[in-house]
Each structure stands twice: as structure tokens, then as C-alpha cells.
Image (spheres, grey):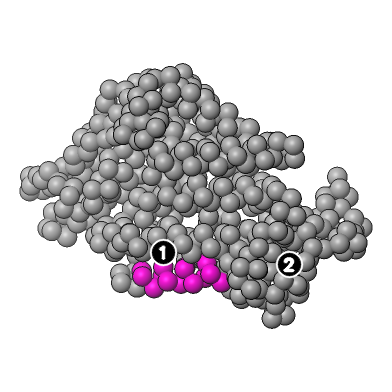
Amino acid sequence: MNHKIQAYLNTYTDAAPLAFYRLAFGLMMFFSILRFAYNGWISKFYIDPIFHFTYYGFGWVKPIGVYTYLLFIICGISALMVAFGYKYRLGILLFFLSFTYIELMDKTTYLNHYYFISIVSFVLLFLPANVLFSVDAKQNKVDRSQVVPRYTIDILKVLLAIVYIYAGVAKLNSDWLFHAMPLKIWLPSKASLPIIGHLLGYDWVAYAFSWFGAIYDLGIVFLLLYKPTRLFGFILVVIFHVMTRILFPIGIFPFVMIISTLLFFSPQFHRKALQLFSKIFRIDRVISESPTPKTVASQSNPTRTSPKLVPILLGVFLMIQLVFPFRYLLYPGELFWTEEGYRFSWRVMLMEKAGYTEFTVSDKATGQFKVVDNTEFLTKFQIKQMSFQPDFILEYAHFLHEYYQKQGMTDPEVKVNCHVALNGRLSQKYIDPNVNLAKQYESFKHKTWILPFNDTIKGF
């Protein structure tokens, strides 16, 4: 086994797919940052709110006022450095740190693809993505090479496979397959779309979309891996993600996935793409010439000893990615209801959840009592997300405790009257209204103050 692993680690392949991905990834990230600034979202999401919801263990990551704009500028510039391979290692490090910091500032904006971008940029930090078709290579700031270790491209494919297959497995539940939820709720609202809009109100369309979505996620990687079906698979990728982009507000996620699936194409495809790019922008074409079979063979040597640290580190990282999404199995209760272990598990648009929360703050010593006006502290978007996610509710309760303590209350009690509706079911009480949330603390333990779900969702 060790011999086979060593032989694999010492197998080399054309560097073009990695160079192309670096270029495409960097440009996509640059334009996504521009899009964020153009729409005014930097101020709307990170500067204007007076309170931000943080991830457990990362409460120290906060927006930095007007300097948050500087953070986005660093992120945008570093994305360009990655794209063009200029001081690549510094560029991808700055991009990973700045982008991840931005995403950690407020979990209200959490999306699966933001997480995907963070883990891909972390992996790119260790890959020789600048040995070809880069400024670094042109200026001899790095050893030019037409080939790279095969695992440096394969690991990106594996990460992509995890996203798709885990998303497919997550769809194998009774709500999605047998009740077409939540698509049965969402699709009729798109009835105004041209051509297909009049069909979206039919139940059979919701069922068809649900089943196709599950089959697509479970099978698309295998279509892309197999050369005879690769082009068909990519056409499905484009159709699927263009449709999701039309139907749902999921930002640049469709484009990230479309570009990423090109990794499964042959090096010749990427060579042609790079040569076209070099022709348009008049870049030295010498650095985009194909390696000969002899070049690849001379690098590949099953008996040589490769550097061990990077493959080991990436292997451990990959194992974490494979196991981490299943942490929800350690918690009791329905996952969609408690959401304990829900994030970072590639569960994409699986539920429609809406809630109502009314917080009360009381002071036992004085009898002072107040019903909280959430709009006084939170934006409309934050209220919507907070109203059905337990960790949001708990964090907000602690904020209220501190706020009213500063207003003169003695150790105020914070309780909530909360009702939540899940995937078209009738709304039911969500949080134990008798629990003082100010005395409950965030941890990896099960939140016992979440009331039981009065139904069963079978499956994963």
C-alpha cells in the first residue's frame, strides 16, 4: 500500500489544468468582490448593522468599521495576484485570510459556496499553481515547469466530488423525494418567468426537479470522470447551474461550479484555453507550450522520495472534509429542526423554514419587564435568519442580556416565545419559553432547550 501511495505521489501530469484553474478562480473571485462592492453589500451587511452573529469560537472576528472596505480591497487585489500568478504564494495567502475573515464576520450571510471558496483557497496555498502561465514563471520568481504532481489536481477534483455527492446524499430524505419540499413552495413564486414560468405551479414539476436534482448531484461526478460521457456531463452541469441561477438567488455559486468542473477535462483543453487567453492578451506563448510525453515521464518516478509534508497535510485536510459533514449523527433530534451539525455539510437549499420570535427581558429584583423590538438592534435580514436558527437565538439573547444590564437591569432574564414552520408544516413552538437563555451557553453539546419536532423526516 505504501509503495502504491508513494508511486502515486511521484506521478506527474500536465500543469495546464492547474494553471487554468488558478487563472479562472482568481478572476471569478475578483469579480465577485467587485459585485459585492457594486451592490453596496459591504456597508449593508458588515458596517451598517449594530450587531453581528458570529461563529462559535470565532467571536473575535468582527467588522472593522470603515476599514472593512480596506479588507475587501485587499481581497480583490489578492484575487488578481492569484489569477495572474504574481507573487502567487503571497496572493493566495492574503486571499484565503481576507476572504475567510469576511465570511466569519457575520454568519447571517453563510452560504455553502463561500465555505467552498475558503477551503479551495486554503488548498491552493499548497499547490504549485504558478509554475506555468504566470508572472512568477515569466520573471523566474519560481521554477518553471510544464508538469506538476498528479495529486495537486486530483485533490481539487475530490473536493468538488465531495460537494456534489454529499449534496446528493442529503437530498435522499422523505421531504425532498416524496413531498417535493421545499421546491413545491418555492417554484410557484417564479411563475412570472418567461417560457417555463407557467409550468412551475404544477406539483409534478416540483417532483421532477427534486428527483432530477438528487440524481444529478449523485451522478454528475461519474459522468465527468468517464471520457465518453464527459461532454454530456458538462452540458448537464451548465443547464443545471444556469437553471438554479435563474430560479434562486445563489450569487456566483453556479459559475464557480461550472468553472470548477472543467478540471475534469483533458490537459489539451486547458492548453487551448490558455493559448487563446495568451493570444487575446498578447502574453508570451512560450509558457503555454505542451509538455512532451518524455517530459512527463522524466518527472514521474515511482521509486523516488517526494516531499512528505504537503501530501500528508492535504491528506489530513481531506479526511476532515470527508468526515466533518457527518457530525450531525452525534446529535439527537431532527437535523432540519435543530440544525446541529447542519452548516458546512453541503446541504444546499433543502428546507424552507420561517419563524417568529418575541423576546422578553425581565428584572426579578425590580419587576421591570420589557418586550424587545428586534428591529431596534437587527436588520430585516438578520431577524429573518435569527428567527429559526437556535444558535442565532441564543447569541442574540446574550446580546440582549448585556444590553439591558448596561441599561440598569440586574442580571436580566431573557426568554423567547418562538414558533417555527418547516417545509410547509404548521408552525409549532420551537424554544422552551420557560428557559432563561441568558444562562445557556453555546457549545458543541446538544441544546436541550430546543423543543422536539412533532413529525418525522426519514432519510439522511
Residue at the image point whose x is 79% and y is 63% from the top? 290
Q: Please name the amino acid that badge 2 sits on.
A: Ser
What is the magenta segment's predominant secondary structure?
Answer: helix
The picture quadrant where one finds residue 40 is bottom left
Q: In the figure, 349 relative to 25: above or below?
A: above
- SS type, badge 2: helix
Where the N terminus falls, by quadrant?
A: top right
Say which label, 2 or 1, has the lower sequence index. 1
Label at residue 34: 1
**Is residue 422 something one can see in this rendering?**
no
Please provide percent x and percent y for residue 443: 42, 46
Residue labelled with disc 2? 288
Please provide percent x and percent y for residue 456: 42, 20
What distance separates the C-alpha of mark 2 from that of mark 1?
29 Å
Please provide percent x and percent y for residue 163: 57, 42
Q: Give the class, few, some or many, for how many residues have Cα within 10 Å of label 2's Cα (few <14, many ≥20).
A: many
Q: Which span is picked out in magenta?
A: 68-81
Q: Please name the amino acid that badge 1 sits on.
A: Leu
